[in-house]
Image (cartoon, rainbow, N blue to C red):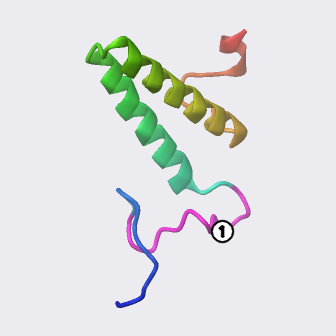
Amino acid sequence: MAGCSNHLDQGEEPGASSDDPGDGGVSVTTVERLLDRKQQLMERLLDNPGPHERGEIENQLEKIDTALNLLGYAGPGISEDDEN
């Protein structure tokens, strides 16, 4: 399809749209992508990265956690009571 600007993000299935959640809520695809990225970063931390890389990973994890909190998703096993 020449000139077609649509593309699939890594791991996104054809027909899935993060722009159209259907019910006006947050797209599951968006949350899934954030959780997948968080898991990848957590696994990288297990490889004992150097201090610079560790700082970058932790910074990205903080941003993902902020995004998930703004989307109203705390994740499995995490509740507001646990944070206090």
Residue under numbered circle 1: 22
Q: Which portion, as a residue range, is magenta?
A: 13-25
Picture coordinates of residue 26 (x, y %)? 66, 54
Magenta span includes 18: yes
Up/down of 51 relative to 71, above or below? above
| Frontmost residue, 70 versus 23 | 70
| Frontmost residue, 3 versus 14 | 3
Residue at 57% x, 26% y is 62
Up/down of 34 relative to 13, above or below? above
Q: In this view, does 49 lie to the left or right of 64?
A: left
In which quarter of the view is residue 51 placed? Answer: top left
Q: Which quarter of the rendered picture does the C terminus lie within? A: top right
Q: Which residue lies furthest to the left in this view?
A: 47
Residue at 68% x, 13% y is 83
In which quarter of the view is residue 11 placed? Answer: bottom left
Q: Is residue 70 left or right of residue 33?
A: right
In which quarter of the view is residue 38 placed? Answer: top left
Up/down of 43 relative to 24, above or below? above
Q: Residue furthest bottom?
A: 2
Residue at 61% x, 66% y is 19
The chief SS type of the magenta part is loop
Q: Which quarter of the rendered picture does the N terminus lie within? A: bottom left
Residue at 50% x, 42% y is 34
Give the number of marks: 1
Picture coordinates of residue 56 (x, y %)? 45, 25
Mark 1, Cα crowd under 10 Å, few <14 / some 14-19 / many 20+, is few
Q: Residue furthest top?
A: 84
Q: What amino acid type is highlighted by mark number 1? A: Gly
Label 1 residue SS: loop
Q: In this view, does 64 lie to the left or right of 72?
A: left
